Amino acid sequence: MAEKNLVLSETASNKIKSDLGSERLDTTALRVTVGEDGAAFDYQLEFVDRSEKGPEDLLVETSGVRVFIDSESAPRVAGATLEYVDDLSGSGFRFDNPNSPALIENPLAARVQRVIEEYVNPDVAGHGGHVRLMDVQETRVFLRLGGGCQGCGMADVTLKQGIESTLREHVPEITEVLDVTDHESGADPFYA
């Protein structure tokens, strides 16, 4: 059985070729690095010289584009597709990834993540915020608030009266919801 690798869509391949130009395409590769940040993947893309391929890097060549993926990142993007999107919501590279971070293997974490995606994030998005599940330890949930919620003077109220009550309504076995956000580094809080 063939190993599933990262696939570049036609739009992604064309964008990479356009950005590099034909003179750099022969000497440059795209390096894909994928870390885990709680219940989400953190993707990083960078152009590197082809000579920078490490001995453990997976090499994927598609449509004339050479891609290096380090050995830790490779299983995180196995079977994923890198797309380039240019629409009303913005433009950029996006991953369509069938894989999940290790945290989501915890059934309680998976349920909490589903509530965050379906209820919590749509609510806080109106204030330019978002919430990320960082960890679940037994029945304690650890969250990081970002965007307009990071550094917001109402973050504690939002956490206790909004987020925590929503999570407990849908996942009643939760005993505690903790905010692990560095609110001091918030750049654009909704309420200062």
Image (tube, grey):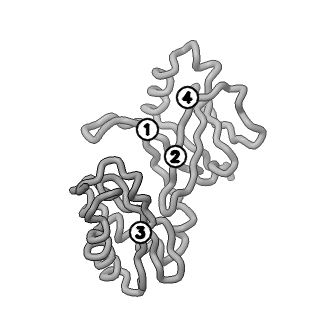
Please name the amino acid that badge 2 sits on: Tyr
Query: Where does label 2 land, which residue?
Result: 43
Query: Which of the labelled discs sits on residue 179, or is there none?
Result: 3
Q: Residue at x 57, y 65 (%)?
A: 102
Chain-order first, disc 3 or disc 4? 4
Label 4's element? loop
Rounded to the nearest angstrom, the CA distance separating label 3 from label 2 is 24 Å
Q: Earlier in the sequence, mark 3 or mark 1?
A: 1
Question: Which residue appears farthest toward the right when viewing the image?
Answer: 55
The mark nearer the N terminus, 4 or 1, is 4
Residue 29 position, x and y percent, is 61, 28
The mark that comes first in sequence, 2 or 4, is 2
Badge 1 vs badge 2, beta-carbon distance below 8 Å? yes
> Foreground mark, 3 or 2?
3
SS under mark 3: strand
Residue 20 is marked as none
| Circle on res. 93 | 1
